[in-house]
Amino acid sequence: MKTKTSLSALKGVLIVITLLITSIAQGQLMRSTNRDIAAAKRDHLGFTVSFGVRSSVLSSNYAAIDGMQALEEGGSAGLVWGSRAFETKLVIGYYYSAAQVKHTTDMIEMEATSNFYPLRALKKEDSRINPYFSMGVTKNYYKLYGYYTTEENSQINYSVSREPYIGKLDVYNASLGAGVAINLLNNYDFVKLFAATQYNKPFSTIASNDFRQTQTSGQWSFNLGVSFGTNRLKGN
């Protein structure tokens, strides 16, 4: 009886030890596989979508918009590609005036930026949270609406729901920014959330005739978004 009990106990211990060894081996294999995938990654290609706000201040010979804060809300979409430590984005977005802006200034934005991930440059293994720095060039195409360019004695039709289009500004900027990306998936495919802020400094402005004396100050932006796509591995 004692012998059977001892054998049963020994079998139980052996089963527990076997399960522990199997669990440890699987964990080591998974970590090794993740390291192998991380080491094999060559570059990635995908799409990016974001929503955010843009804020700048106008200076103009028109008193109605001189010193006015142009605050826009909207979103953008585009392509993203790069290596582990460097990434390039090409996006286009549309931003419309926030409700509190007195005179409508809608904006179409085209942007080309490069992101640098310092932790990825220093570490071979992937981190879930990755800060990054960005620099690039943006073009902001402002469409201006309102009645403030008309003569004082001109008759204004207030029955229309939207102010009339009166001019445009093409503003070219150099940009600097920073952000943080959170990896939700990063093996053969990638999905990451990101939050980023950016400062755009104008270096050239092209305006329609009525707005040749109108300019924008440096623009601040904030975005929340997601990027997703495929990691290309060495040998593929």
Image (tube, rainbow, N blue to C red):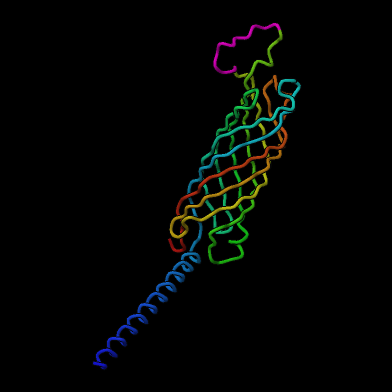
Residue 130 is situated, as x and y percent measured from the top left of the image, at 58, 57
Nearer the observer, 80 or 225 = 225
Is-magenta flag for residue 160?
A: yes
Residue 95 is situated, as x and y percent measured from the top left of the image, at 57, 32
Horizontally, residue 155 falls left or right of residue 128, namely right
Total count of labels: 0
Question: Which quadrant of the figure contains the N terminus?
Answer: bottom left
Identity of the residue drawn at 57% across and 29% down: 96
Residue range highlighted in magenta: 153-163
Identity of the residue drawn at 64% across and 32% down: 71
Q: Magenta region, mostly helix, strand or loop?
A: loop
Residue 74 is situated, as x and y percent measured from the top left of the image, at 55, 35
Nearer the observer, 236 or 151 = 151
Question: Which quadrant of the figure contains the C terminus?
Answer: bottom left
Residue 63 is situated, as x and y percent measured from the top left of the image, at 75, 20
**Eyeballing the image, is 39 above or below 181?**
below
Horizontally, residue 110 falls left or right of residue 206, namely left
